[in-house]
Image: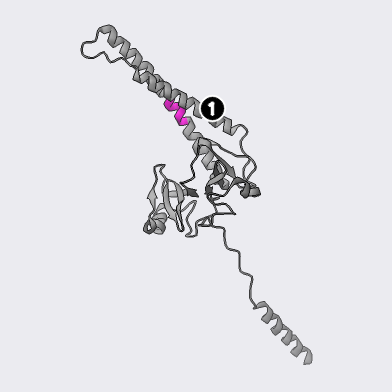
Amino acid sequence: MRIVVIGAALLVALAACSSGPQASAPKPEALGPDGLRGLAPGVTKAAAGATLAAEPMSGFDGCKSYSFAGGPAPQPGAIEEEQRAVAKADGLNRKAQAADAHVLDPGLRGSAADYAKSAAESEAAAKLSAQAAAATVVVTELREERAADLAASGGAVFAGDKVRSVVAPPQVKTPEGAGAGTPLADLHRLYDATGLKPTPEGHFAVAVPGHPTWTYDFTAVGAKATYVALLDASVKCG
């Protein structure tokens, strides 16, 4: 009988221990007013330390993009490819504009030869414009490809030595729960009251509390956000 009593007491003691305070689960990462992983607009590259990859994955417009450490390695020659594409598009656009400006206008009293010359010049200018448009499409596609690569793992974009934007990985949301995969209807529900607006780039942006020049910048395709970045519009590329 004594053995039974001792056994019962031991069970009660064990139950009491198991019902004590439990360790709380860690909070999920969030892209908020304090940034993410020690990164926020204005932080320097040196201060970022090993948080980011050592080499940039893109360099459009004088800004350089770095993935978080452990993300995809930069494509060999990616920045040089961007530079060639931009130089080609810029050169063709300048030539097209110059050719268009020099097309002869024969006027009402122009001769047949004048009209023939004007037609030939117009045709040449149109061909250059088509080539310039095609080259510009290549640049746009490269921009979108690089942005998608960065959004796949998250990272930061630097203007000179300062962070211009921090891009959240797909699983990281704002403190309100918005990010990759959030329906636009939910974005409006969460942020319309605090000034959510479309941007000239076709994104949606809303001010970050406590930081006058910062915004949550949501890129969207169709009816959903594809990624979110913390952007400081006062830090310029170039």
Q: Residues within 10 Å of mark 1 (few under 14, many from 20)?
A: few
Q: Residue furthest bottom?
A: 1
Amino acid bearing label 1? Arg
The residue range painted magenta reads 132-137
Q: Position of residue 107 (x, y in %)?
A: 23, 14
Can residue 232 be seen here?
yes
**Residue at position x 58%, y 30% from top?**
80
Q: Main secondary structure of the magenta part?
A: helix
The secondary element bearing badge 1 is classed as helix
Q: Position of residue 103 (x, y in %)?
A: 33, 16
Q: Position of residue 23 (x, y in %)?
A: 64, 70
Where does the N terminus fall, quadrant-wise?
A: bottom right
**Residue at position x 54%, y 50% from top?**
168
Q: Position of residue 201 (x, y in %)?
A: 41, 42
Query: Does residue 214 lie above or below 93 as drawn?
Result: below
Looking at the rendering, which quadrant does residue 136 occupy?
A: top left
**Residue at position x 45%, y 31% from top?**
137
Q: How many marks?
A: 1
Residue 134 belongs to magenta span: yes
